[in-house]
Amino acid sequence: MRVLFINNDGGGFADHIEVADDATVAQLFSEKVPGRKPADFLIRVNRQPAGADQVLHEGDRVSFTPTKVEGAALVA
């Protein structure tokens, strides 16, 4: 099935991608953002916060937006 995947990490991009039927948010995250922690991202499906076990459906809009920027200096 096809979903709209929006990755707001770095330069960001959006594209329609194919995912397996009954794929979950956690499965898509581990495939598209390997080695990163879900806790460091705001993860939404159809503009609503999503849980890891949420099953994706045809036409869903999935976005991953980092809440922490790696390499950024802490300014006091």
Image: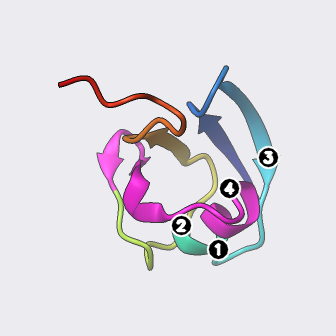
| Image position, residue 40 (x, y; %) | 41, 54
Q: Measure how far apart labels 3 and 2 are at the Cα level.
A: 14 Å
In the picture of the structure, the residue carrying the numbered disc 2 is 25
Q: Measure how far apart labels 2 and 4 are at the Cα level.
A: 12 Å
Q: Which label sits on residue 27?
A: 1
The mark that comes first in sequence, 1 or 4, is 1
Of marks 4 and 3, the one in the foreground: 4
What is the secondary structure assignment of the residue under circle 1? helix
Label 1 is placed on what type of residue?
A: Gln
| Image position, residue 9 (x, y; %) | 59, 34
Q: Quadrant of residue 75?
A: top left
In-image side of 56 versus 35 (left or right): left
Label 4 is placed on what type of residue?
A: Val
- Residue drawn at x 31%, y 31% is 74
Q: Quadrant of the N terminus?
A: bottom right
Circles 2 and 1, Cβ within 8 Å, touching? The answer is yes
Label 3 is placed on what type of residue?
A: Ile
In the picture of the structure, the residue carrying the numbered disc 4 is 33
Label 2 is placed on what type of residue?
A: Val
The stretch drawn in magenta includes residue 38? yes
Crowdedness of circle 3 by 10 Å Cα count: few (<14), some, many (20+)? few
Q: Which label sits on residue 17?
A: 3
The mark that comes first in sequence, 1 or 3, is 3
Q: Is residue 11 above or below residue 42?
A: above
Q: How is the image coloured?
A: rainbow
Crowdedness of circle 4 by 10 Å Cα count: few (<14), some, many (20+)? few
